[in-house]
Every structure is written in C-alpha cells, then in structure tokens.
C-alpha cells in the first residue's frame, strides 16, 4: 500500500512539473544559451578577420601605425571579455557590448584612414577583407536580434503567472538583452 501511495505521489508530482511550465522554461533557457553562442560565434568571426585586415593595411600604410595598434589592442580586449551563458545579466551584457563597441569604433577609424590611400583601396585582398568585415557586422546584428527575441520569449515565460512561481522555486531568472549604444540614435557625420 505504501509503495502504491509513493508511486501515485511520484506520478502526480511528475505530471505537475510537466504542466507547470518547468520543461518549457528549461527549453527556452537552452534556446537563449544557444542564441548567445551564435552571438559569440559572430563576434569571434570578426576577431579572427581583424589580424588579416590589419596585416593587409600594414603593408600599404605603414605610417598609420597608431591606428593599427589601436585596432589590435581593441581586438585583444574584446576577445578577453566573455560572458558565462548561465549569467546573462544586464550588467554582463552591457560590459560585453562595451568592449565590442570599442572594437567597432577602432575598425571604423581604420577604414576611414584607408580612404586616404587609393593604392590600398584598389587592392583586391583589402576589398575582400572589407566585404567580409561588412558581412560579419551584418551577421552580428542578425544574431543579436535573434538573441534578444529569444530572451524576450524566455523572460515573458518566467515572469508570467503561474510560471513565475515555478521559476522562483527552480532559480530561473530574467536574462539581459543587447541595447543600443548611447548616441546611436544620431546619424554619424561623414567627413572627407
């Protein structure tokens, strides 16, 4: 009799957890982690391309050493900052984004300095790297958007009643999203 009662309680508990949203929250949490991995993948692709870009530019514009050094240092800093997928808080995402934004600004300065060197702009290797870098920036944007959408779906689930009760019991917390960099709502000034 006791075994039957324990089996019934176990069965009831298992059915309760499956209907309480626990499995849904686990699935959505894993989806967020997967999307975060894709964001990191896109940033890693950019970090891998930068040494090639810098070496191509070095060959044609040796007197721009300061700009090249800034790009190399920004890349090193950006690749040293990581975020643990189990702690995707607003602060962790903001810190990660800040280092990646610094790298983006360095690359922008490098590309602007290249405008002064027609020989380099005509170099097919440089043009290919520039196209790859542009494609990578687009991929980063797409992956960040997909991550934010997954986080929105996850956060909605863990904050909705009655899931919020189970989320609290099992430690599911809201995740952070990427936000626009301050001042990005204003168009940049292009000067030649």
Image (cartoon, rainbow, N blue to C red):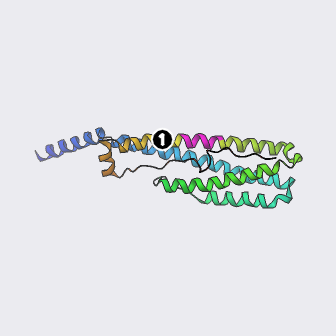
- Is residue 140 in the magenta section? yes
Can you give x and y, in whole percent of width and height, for residue 164 in the image?
32, 46
Report the side of 84 relative to 19 (left or right): right
| The image quarter in which residue 106 lies | bottom right
Can you give x and y, in whole percent of width and height, for residue 136 in the image?
67, 43
- Is residue 143 in the magenta section? yes
The quarter in which the N terminus is drawn is top left
Report the side of 174 relative to 189 (left or right): left
- Out of 48 and 126, give the one closest to the viewer: 126
The residue drawn where x is 86% and y is 42% is 122
- Please tell me how many numbered marks the rendered image carries: 1
Report the side of 74 relative to 30 (left or right): right
Can you give x and y, in whole percent of width and height, for residue 130 in the image?
76, 44
State the extent of the magenta-drawn residues as a range.
138-145
Can you give x and y, in whole percent of width and height, for residue 170 in the image?
33, 51
Query: In the rendered view, would you say 66 is above or below 164?
Result: below
Query: In the rendered view, would you say 127 is above or below 68?
Result: above
Residue at the farthest left position:
1
Q: Main secondary structure of the magenta part?
A: helix
The residue drawn where x is 48% and y is 47% is 33
| The image quarter in which residue 64 lies | bottom right
Residue wearing tag 1:
150
The residue drawn where x is 85% and y is 49% is 116
Q: Secondary structure at mark 1?
A: helix
What crowding class fits label 1: few (fewer than 14 Cα within 10 Å), some (14-19), or many (20 or more)?
many
The residue drawn where x is 31% and y is 41% is 161
Report the side of 92 relative to 41 (left or right): left
- Out of 63 and 76, give the one closest to the viewer: 63
């Amino acid at each position: 009799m006791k075994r039957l009662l324990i089996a019934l309680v176990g069965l009831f508990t298992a059915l309760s957890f499956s209907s309480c949203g626990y499995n849904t929250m686990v699935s959505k949490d894993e989806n967020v982690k997967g999307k975060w991995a894709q964001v990191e993948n896109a940033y890693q692709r950019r970090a891998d391309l930068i040494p090639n870009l810098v070496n191509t530019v070095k060959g044609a514009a040796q007197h721009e050493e300061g700009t090249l050094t800034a790009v190399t240092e920004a890349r090193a800093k950006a690749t040293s900052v990581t975020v643990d997928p189990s702690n995707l808080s607003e602060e962790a995402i903001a810190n990660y984004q800040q280092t990646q934004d610094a790298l983006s600004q360095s690359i922008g300065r490098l590309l602007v300095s290249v405008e002064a060197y027609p020989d380099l702009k005509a170099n097919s290797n440089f043009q290919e790297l520039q196209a790859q870098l542009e494609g990578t920036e687009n991929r980063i944007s797409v992956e960040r958007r997909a991550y934010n959408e997954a986080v929105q779906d996850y956060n909605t689930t863990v904050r909705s009643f009655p899931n919020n009760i189970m989320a609290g019991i099992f430690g599911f917390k809201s995740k952070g999203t990427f936000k626009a960099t301050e001042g990005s709502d204003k168009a940049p000034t292009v000067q030649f």
